[in-house]
Image (cartoon, helix red, strand yellow):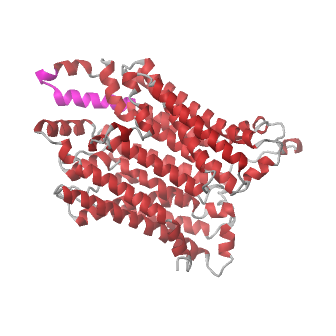
Amino acid sequence: MWFGSVYLKTLRDFRIAIFGWGIGLGLLMYAVVTAISSVIATPEARASLVSLAGSFAWIAEPIKVDTAGGYATWKYGFTILVMALWPILVGSRMLRGEEERGSLDMLLSQPRGRGLVVLEKLAAMWTALLAMALLIGLLTYAGGARVNAEFTLSESLLFGLNLALICGVFGSIALLIAQFTQERRTASGITGGLLALFIVVDMIHRVIPDTDWISRLSPVYYYNLSKPLIPSYGSNPVAMLVMVALSVVLSGAAIWLFLRRDVGAPVALPQWLQPPKRAMRPEQALPVNAWSLRSVYTRSLATIAVPTFWWTVVIAGFSAWMIFIVQQTEQKLRTLYEGSPLLKDLLTKVGGGDVNTNATLLSFFFVFLPVLLMAFAVTQAGRWAADEEDGLQELVLATPQSRLSVVLARYAAVATATVIIAMVTLALTTLASAASGLALNGGNLAAASLSIIPLGLLMAALGYLFSGWLRAAVDTGLLSFLLVIWFFITFVGPELNWPAGVQRLSAFYYYGTPLLHGLPLGDMLLVLAITVVALALASARFVRKDIGR
């Protein structure tokens, strides 16, 4: 039955993602909703939560944060957007990925029209998103029923639907961008960058007054207009229809372009958008003396230069943006606590004067730096696995290169990119701190920026190890799922009073709070030791395995 149509076959391929993302994020919401009773166990704790939410309103609008639905919406309504990564990957490889592998040619040789093929694939993606939304909604409702929350089953399902709609928008963006790129990786990378950009654009109106018109340019703005888990706020049908319209328009444009271009080729840009062509001498046609072709390492470094640049922009830009956000947060805390004689000591510390206070606030946000760098490592591990699956490793191994030198050179290029990202992040955060007047300990700031390197190296080494047995798509999916599990253990586990032994299972645990306590040398050495073991096992597997199997 599952091979009776393109729609069913594509939906079958999504079965693991449906249960993984649906149940995983559903359990996250279940845990957060049921944790509200412990978070507001006393009147003092309730008042503290309300004050804290008001101080961090730039993340999400704090509405009834002392209720189960309001708390879950404020704290994880933004974080749950990680689910958008799945449709971004699907949208970028839906057509372009199959064109790269040559499988789309075989599919189109059957008596099926181009339009019907892409519509069935697109319908399968939306069915998968709605199935995930259903699972998330049901588990959210189950958590609410356990603590007698105010929201109903229909409101829980609307929460899942709202999430599915914004994810569908980014899947449609990826599908459209893939029509203009030669590789699926480029399309997914650009769309991932747009996701980060749109999240920041949505934050602007909560940081700078009277800038709603700027935030309206972001699809995330319309996602945040609906808060179904807060009955007094409810859903915004117009905003949800805007996301539906965006998906239809973007997907329609992608289909229209696909029907009019050659399979395997990108859309030809108008003449006025094409860069001027320069005459090339015959000796320049093949860059035999180019530095990037002198070794596997330099070639790998040149290949990942562009994605490294954009990931550096995202990670370093995020860290610098957080410096200015902390300054805004301190000003709001000053306004909130003004006139309270009990908080005079605190008021003397805010505003950039006390290093420990600034570091405490900034630590709330710097925990996302290793998450972002490890996401970069996931993409590069997926590239290594995809090159073998696409038959590119045979070309490299046909030259006088040993297998061990190839795998170590490729990993060394990823390690170099990881170090570059961390160093640029450190430089930019230092400049932002000086420009904003936010006092920070220079050594601890360096530790916070550079401690992300071992975590990125660990994720890359695990990806290389898993690729010895798994296909590229499964390898990337497993790494992404592992990242989500670690995130869940670190950021939700403490609220559920999980023992320290469980929290140590997460790689993020070993990052610690370097802004406050400096470099966690012992923990970093442990992470590096595990990385070395994983890389050694990955190298041994690659040296002995049949390529492509």
Q: Position of residue 485 (x, y in %)?
A: 42, 48
Residue under the image location 62 percent in, 39 percent down: 535
Q: Residue at x 30, y 18 (%)?
A: 354
Which secondary structure dominates the residues rendered in magenta? Answer: helix
Give the side of residue 462 with respect to residue 546, left or right. left
505 above or below 239? Answer: above
**Picture residue at 49% right of the left edge, 37% below the top:** 315
Q: Is residue 1 magenta?
A: no
Q: Say whether residue 239 is visible.
A: no
On screen, residue 394 versus residue 344, left or right, reads right
- Residue at image position (31%, 39%) is 499
Q: Relative to 73, is 250 above or below?
A: below
The percent position of residue 16, horizontal first and vertical second, equals 48, 62
Q: Does the magenta segment cover residue 336? A: yes
Where residue 176 sits, quadrant-wise, is: bottom right
In magenta, the rendered stretch is 323-343
- Near-viewer residue (501 or 511): 501
Q: Position of residue 387 (x, y in %)?
A: 68, 52
Residue that sits furthest to the bottom in the current view: 111
**For residue 234, what is the image quadrant?**
bottom left
